[in-house]
Amino acid sequence: MSDGIYVYCIIRSDGEKKSFGNMGFGGNEVYTIDYRDFSPVVSIAPVKKYEVNEEEVELHKNIVQLIMNEYSVIPVAYGMVFKNRKLITVAMSAGYKAIKKAMEAIDNKIELGVKVIMPKDAALNGKKEECKSEYLERLKKIAHDSKELKLFSERLILNASFLVAKDKINEFSGEVENLTNKYDYLRTQYSGPWPPYNFVDIHVLSKKKGGFR
């Protein structure tokens, strides 16, 4: 099995190669390569079809999370490996406009998640929509963007992700706390910060989902 270049995420470039240490697949160095004003964050990794593997998915996510602590990141889908640098350049060229637009949308912002859950056997007497509406209305005022996600349980009143400017995180967290206290008979799950997976096309470097080029 030959080695290629695996892409974790994309950050802005300042013209200098960056190294984040030997934490990639196989303990390989995670570093940047430049394309115009952007830098894919990469490591050497086998060229193969990356099946969903909990340990490898977690490694991918943890690396993106670490980079996010210092940079605005466009996350890239798990399993995006290229046979050589030239093919990354081709993909970056093809996706450049979308990458630039995505970075403008998420620059200096992170994703925060809010789930609101109804207790077992709770009777809200038709107040579910009222609760959901207030959460959304108040949190959307602070967030730059929001997305309602699938309700995968009958007890789930709200499942949403919010794109929040880094300097608004404390304000947003305070509003979540206020809502949690007001609706203390509900369970609020607040998570993040996360890379903005729900606000960019994570397949920006490929026309297909996963695989290699």
Image (cartoon, rainbow, N blue to C red):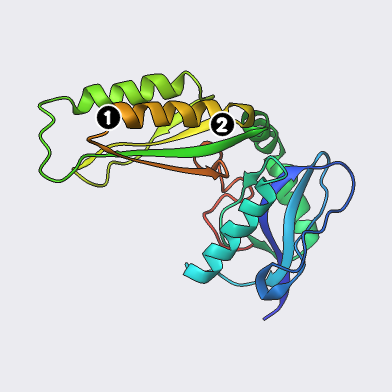
**Where is mark 2, residue-wise?**
169
Whole-angstrom CA distance, mark 2 to mark 1, is 21 Å
In the rendered image, residue 198, in percent from the top left (x then y), is placed at 49, 40
User: Is residue 10 left or right of 184 when viewed as pictured?
Assistant: right
Residue 213 sits in quarter = bottom right
Q: Nearer the viewer, residue 177 or 159?
A: 177
Q: Which-is-in-front pick, marks 2 and 1?
A: 1
Q: Is residue 53 visible?
A: no
Q: Residue at x 58, y 37 (%)?
A: 110
In the rendered image, residue 138, in percent from the top left (x then y), is placed at 40, 20
Q: Residue at x 30, y 22 (%)?
A: 133
In the rendered image, residue 2, in percent from the top left (x then y), is placed at 71, 78
43, above or below 92, in the image:
below
Residue 48 sits in quarter = bottom right
Identify the image quadrant of the N terminus: bottom right
Dot 2 crowding, Cα within 10 Å, few <14, some 14–19, many 20+:
some
Dot 1 crowding, Cα within 10 Å, few <14, some 14–19, many 20+:
some
Q: Nearer the viewer, residue 108 or 37?
A: 108
Q: Is residue 212 visible?
A: yes
201, above or below 133, in the image:
below
Ranked by sequence position, the earlier of labels 2 and 1 is: 2
Say what amino acid the circle numbered 2 marks: Ile
Say what amino acid the circle numbered 1 marks: Tyr
User: Is residue 7 left or right of 201 when viewed as pictured?
Assistant: right
**Where is mark 1, residue-wise?**
183
- Circle 1 — which element? loop
Q: Residue at x 21, y 39 (%)?
A: 118
- Circle 2 — which element? helix
